[in-house]
Amino acid sequence: MTTVSHALNDKGRVDPATRALVAQVVHQLGYRANRHAQGLRSGRSGALALLLPIRTDARADEALSLDFYLRLASAAAGAAFSQEQALMLLPPTIVQTGLHGLGLDGGIVVDPSPRDPRVSLLAGQGLPVVTIERDLGRPDDLWFVASEAAVNARQVLDHLAARGARRIALLVPRTDWGWATETLSAYDSWVREHRVPRLITPVAMEPGEESAFLAARRLLDRPRPPDAIFVVAARFVRGVLRAAEAAGRRVPGQLLIAAGVDSLQAREGHPPVTALDLHPERQAEAAVEMLLARLNDDRVEAPRYIPATLRLRTSTGGQPVTGSS
């Protein structure tokens, strides 16, 4: 029994020929280890948590309908399942109710606020945590996967400027999430360097489309309106397109529009909107890999940055992109 156990778990000193024989018999028998028994011995449940940035009223929260989070959650599940791990999507009320009765090995927190209470909840139970995007309130915590927000913002701004824009407005969400804060800081630096007007409009996250519509209409009704709008959040895209149409501004002829997050709204907009593909699938897979490495005490790169791809579409004078973009 000890020899078989060592052979199956790659432990101890077992003759290579014996190891091969054990593997052959295991394959012939279709044997699988008892996960429950392994969990009792190791103290592991085999379950990981995923926490999306959802408000208490989850049924009314737009985040659940955004394809960025759907793609991210799907990829996280696939990455976990490939390692024979369960993935639990936790409700937002977990911060108030606690983790009682939930057997978890660790968690992935998406879009944390500074000193995010979801991170505190998991860490307070001694569970390892990986965040997707930085928790700016924990500057010493390197366990995160993130987009290069400042680099991404400059890429969009440089693209708009190359297409002739001189008055670029920023529609930034009213949130303290790390990527939004870093995008705003990058915009400020860019406009100072290029000596162009600073046109920043904070927009409420809920209801995203209507809030963006009203904000963009105010911008376009100014005596000196912007000639381009950098729409930071995916949920704002439709509202900005509606505002441009209502104001009689041709896109891209009279107004350029680019988005900070690629989405269904951008891909299927009228016209299709140039956007940054942040590759949520790669972010999710990297986060699962990092969390499992922490659990197994394996070496892993941390933090991990996932480069974005700027998808050029009609809204900035490019050609519509079809297919997987």
Image (cartoon, grey):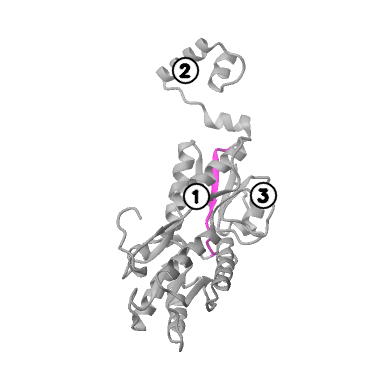
Relative depth, front residue between 214 and 195: 195
Q: Label 1 vs label 3: CA separation? A: 21 Å
Q: Is residue 168 left or right of residue 181?
A: left
Q: Label 2 vs label 1: CA separation? A: 35 Å
* Circles 1 and 3: CB atoms closer than 8 Å: no
Q: Which residue is under mark 3?
A: 123
* Circles 3 and 2: CB atoms closer than 8 Å: no
Q: Position of residue 12 (x, y in %)?
A: 62, 17
| SS at circle 2 | helix
Q: Position of residue 325 (x, y in %)?
A: 35, 55
Asked whether residue 178 is in view, the answer is: yes
Q: Point out the tag, 1 or 3, that comes first from the N-terminus.
A: 3
For discs 2 and 1, the disc positioned in front in the rendered view: 1
Q: Position of residue 67 (x, y in %)?
A: 41, 58
Q: Residues within 10 Å of mark 2 (few under 14, many from 20)?
A: some
Query: Is-magenta flag for residue 126?
Result: no
- Tell me if residue 199 comes above or below residue 154 in the rendering: below
Q: Which residue is under mark 2?
A: 23
Q: Residue at x 45, y 80 (%)?
A: 226
Relative depth, front residue between 65 and 213: 213
User: How many discs mark residues in the rendered view?
Assistant: 3
Q: Which residues are magenta?
A: 45-56
Relative depth, front residue between 145 and 125: 145
Q: Residue at x 37, y 66 (%)?
A: 273
Q: Is residue 202 left or right of residue 74?
A: right
- Tell me if residue 139 comes above or below residue 23 in the rendering: below
Query: Is-magenta flag for residue 52?
Result: yes
Name the amino acid type tagged 2: Ala
